[in-house]
Amino acid sequence: MAQARLLLRALWEQVEDISRKIEDEEARVARRPAGSTPRAHRVNTAQLRKELYQLHGMIDGINRRFPQIAAGV
């Protein structure tokens, strides 16, 4: 179970990192010059969101397998 806790902690760190990257991409889109196309930013943000959803899926799997970790026991 100690390994599951370590993995969970690492996954949450990745969630924080990717969330920060998504925020950065969205800020770049908001700052882009008028008339420019944000396509590259949308593609990058979509990929980051996909990774984020996958991470949350892994976290959910660990929490289902080890409910005592999710409960903080």
Image (tube, rainbow, N blue to C red):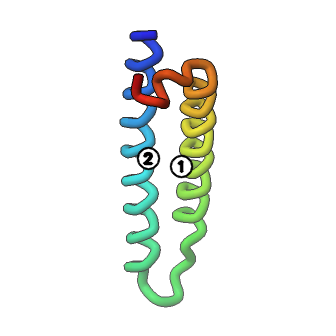
Q: Amino acid at mark 2?
A: Ile
Q: Residue at x 46, y 73 (%)?
A: 29
Q: How many numbered discs sit on the rendered protein?
A: 2
Residue 31: give x, y in percent of width and height: 38, 79
Secondary structure under tag 2 reads helix
Residue 48: give x, y in percent of width and height: 54, 49
Label 1 packing within 10 angstroms: few (<14), some (14-19), many (20+): some
Q: Of all residues shown, which one is farthest toward the bottom?
A: 34
Residue 70: give x, y in percent of width and height: 49, 30
Q: Are marks 2 and 1 in contact (CB under 8 Å)?
A: yes
Q: Which residue is mark 1?
A: 48
Q: CA distance from mark 2 to mark 1?
A: 6 Å
Q: Residue at x 38, y 62 (%)?
A: 24
Identify the image quadrant of the C terminus.
top left
Q: Residue at x 40, y 10 (%)?
A: 2
Q: Which residue is mark 2?
A: 18
Quick one: 45 or 65, which is closer to the camera? 65
Q: Does residue 40 lie above or below 49 as drawn?
A: below
Label 2 packing within 10 angstroms: few (<14), some (14-19), many (20+): some
Q: Which mark is residue 38?
A: none
Quick one: 66 or 32, which is closer to the camera? 66
